[in-house]
Amino acid sequence: MRIKFLFYLLALFLIALGTGLFCYICKAGNAGTHTYLIEGAIIFILIYLVVFYRRVVRPMNTIGNGMELLREQDFSSRLSPVGQYEADRMVNIFNRMMDQLKNERLRLREQNHFLDLLIQASPMGVIITTLDDEVSQLNPAALKMIGVTSEEIIGKRLTQINSPLATELAAIPKESATVVRLNDASIYKCSRSYFIDRGFKHPFFLIERMTEEVIRAEKRAYEKVIRMIAHEVNNTTAGITSTLDTVEQALSAEPNMDDICEVMHICTERCYSMSRFITRFADVVKIPEPTLRPTPLNELVAGCTRFMEGLCNDHNISLRLETASDINIVNVDTSLFEQVLVNILKNAVESIRNISNDRQGQITVRTFAPAGIEVIDNGPGISKEVEAKLFTPFFSTKPHGQGIGLIFIREVLTRHGCTFSLRTGDDNLTRFRILFNNQITSFNNKNEDYTQKTL
């Protein structure tokens, strides 16, 4: 029971007792002295109780109100002095404590707000998961890297997200870091760690984009090596071919030297072949800066597709073109981009040649709004292990491949500001997808949505 209730109960008892004695005195007419003393004692006790209430009970009620403020976490209210020394000391201590709690809350709130703004603006991706490995928070940079919307990822596990980067993140062991290469030539440094909050470990991922830095470092490395090798090989082969030509011409006039002349001619052709071989590597580092001009995307794709028609017919491959309406005009270097499309189609043809003869090879080239190209083939596909190495310098799955075709494609598309990917989907179709980010305008075609043509 509360002290205030006990105080009121005692006061009511004394008032009732005093009233009873007063009635008794009135009826008796001549009461004894002790009766008046008891009545006076009751009045004195009532007066003392009033003083006791003001000095003890009322301050305790004030302190109780302060406890309610703490329970409700209302740090903006303060207690007023009650005029009692001991109680006022407690009130002053309580008010100072409330000031400190309020200042600490404001500091933490400002700090959390600052950290939240910093994380939201950070170019590094941050993903925070629950103890069940479900994504609870992530910043815009992480959303952009993974390539999904917040509705598609919040509350789900990374293994449930249709994204190559999410799949790689889910495979990272706890408290470790790794470098991830994706099928769109993107390179990320990914770390998986945790922080302690309220006694629990909260896992999180840090994703740092390293594509530009790694590509620049790779390019500096292979440019230097290629230039040095090309210089030495071309100088050496030039001297050798000149000497062989001179000797061949001299021996051709002598009898019975046809076999030797033929051998020298083969050696000369081999030197020229080696020179052409190394020149192809040198051409990769001499890609000119693109001269961008507004170009209708459908016309560009149609021209390249017609150019590759003969090669597809030679290998009994069905080539189909699908052009979408409302495709934006894009800024491209036509000559460079045509080489990119020809290389992509040539790779698709070479891939289909590896499938069995009882299956019809098919290549579909399609454009899609607002400005994108997709080359689809039903070749043998690309394994997950190969996907990460596709755009690595000098990597090739072909027996006699040099590994410079995809490097050339990567360089040109990067300089055009395109995003791209090469992967085999669950339907066993391989797609090379290119999306332009420098579209400038659009024109409307109110005819059918797609114009299909089998070449």
Image: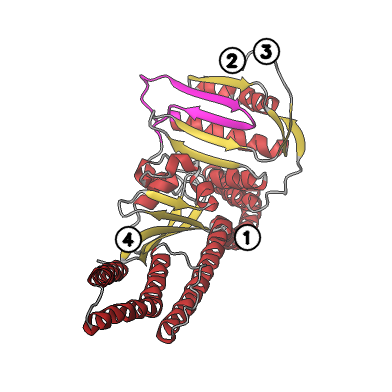
Q: What element carries label 1?
A: helix
Identify the mark nearer the N-term, 2 or 1: 1
Q: Can residue 185 be seen in this view?
A: no
Q: Can residue 354 be found in the magenta stretch?
A: yes
The residue located at (48%, 77%) in the rendering is 95
Question: Which residue is disc 2 drawn over?
Answer: 453
Gap between marks 1 and 4, in whole Å?
A: 43 Å
Name the kind of residue labelled 1 in the image. Answer: Arg
Name the kind of residue labelled 4 in the image. Answer: Lys
Identify the mark nearer the N-term, 3 or 1: 1
Question: Which residue is disc 4 drawn over?
Answer: 174
Gap between marks 2 and 1, in whole Å?
A: 44 Å
Q: Which mark is residue 447?
A: 3
Question: Which residue is disc 1 drawn over?
Answer: 227
Q: Quadrant of residue 357?
A: top left
Identify the mark nearer the N-term, 3 or 2: 3
In front of the other: 263 or 205: 205
Query: In the figure, is residue 41 to the left or right of 138?
Result: left
